[in-house]
Image (cartoon, rainbow, N blue to C red):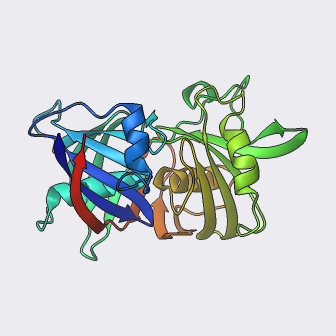
Amino acid sequence: MQIAYVKMQGTGNKILVVDQRQSNLPPPAPSALRKLGNEATGPGFDQMMWVSRPANPLHAASYRVFNADGSEVEQCGNGVRCVASVLAGNRRPSKLMTLESPAGTVSVRFNDDGLLSVSMGTPQFEPARVPFVADAYAPQYSLDVDGRELDISVVSMGNPHCVLQVTDVASAPVAEIGPEIEHHERFPSRTNVGFMKISDRRNIELRVHERGVGETLACGTGACAAVVAGQKLGLLDDEVNVRLPGGQVVVSWRGGKEPVWLTGNAELISEGTLDL
């Protein structure tokens, strides 16, 4: 069976968008997803966004998110922008586009400069909502990783995130301790891991080890998690530029129950068909 795809990139994050609103086919099995996600055996992607008809006819579409290892996850900020861009085509809507995700509805705004802003929902800090094993909420926790105590922040952006502060992102031990933290017993659903350097109150640098993928050039929900974690510690302003290996995004949060807004690009790489 041949189905069409559009391969996009958002801040360097490789996103495969498969629009199944007409046929509403189910997504491939994990074994097939792993082959498709590997550039040696498929088009290659960090995340696949499987787009279907929405439950609410007033919404543009619904989507599910799959990592390159075949696992399904709750949210992908860079992927949302890519889905919205594909659905809009050459037309740029003057009003918000609403999409349905496993983490809830999200709204997308098309800006005059060509960038897209996504309302990523309200961050969740209570350990049980992340999920993270802890007796009570704290702005920071101590995490034992092979006998080394690390100070971490924990937040859910629809998916779990652990954020560490580092003095230099280039030398941060992403490959060494990222997988260990991802699979740590205190994260029952595993976690994404962000390594953040705060340059000043409006600028950070970030590298992210993504759950089920490894390090990627960018992670939209990871950028949101890092900023809100820094804000909860009183270290960052309401709007922050986040520099990632794949480029820059802007994260805005006014605190409380306000949603986090993520602004960045969504650009075409290629189009083709998948042989299922």
- Report whether 54 appears left or right of 227: left
Q: Residue at x 74, y 42 (%)?
A: 140
Q: Residue at x 50, y 43 (%)?
A: 256
Q: Position of residue 176 (x, y in %)?
A: 76, 51
Which sits in the foreground, 172 or 225?
Answer: 172
Say if 221 sits above or below 103 in the image: below
Say if 269 sits above or below 133 in the image: below
Q: Residue at x 62, y 61 (%)?
A: 207
- Report whether 94 appears left or right of 29: left
Q: Quadrant of residue 184?
A: top right
Which sits in the foreground, 74 or 9?
Answer: 9
- Report whether 61 appears left or right of 186: left
Location of the C terminus by quadrant is: top left
Q: Position of residue 244 (x, y in %)?
A: 55, 67
Location of the N terminus by quadrant is: top left
Q: Position of residue 3 (x, y in %)?
A: 18, 46
Q: Position of residue 86 (x, y in %)?
A: 20, 58
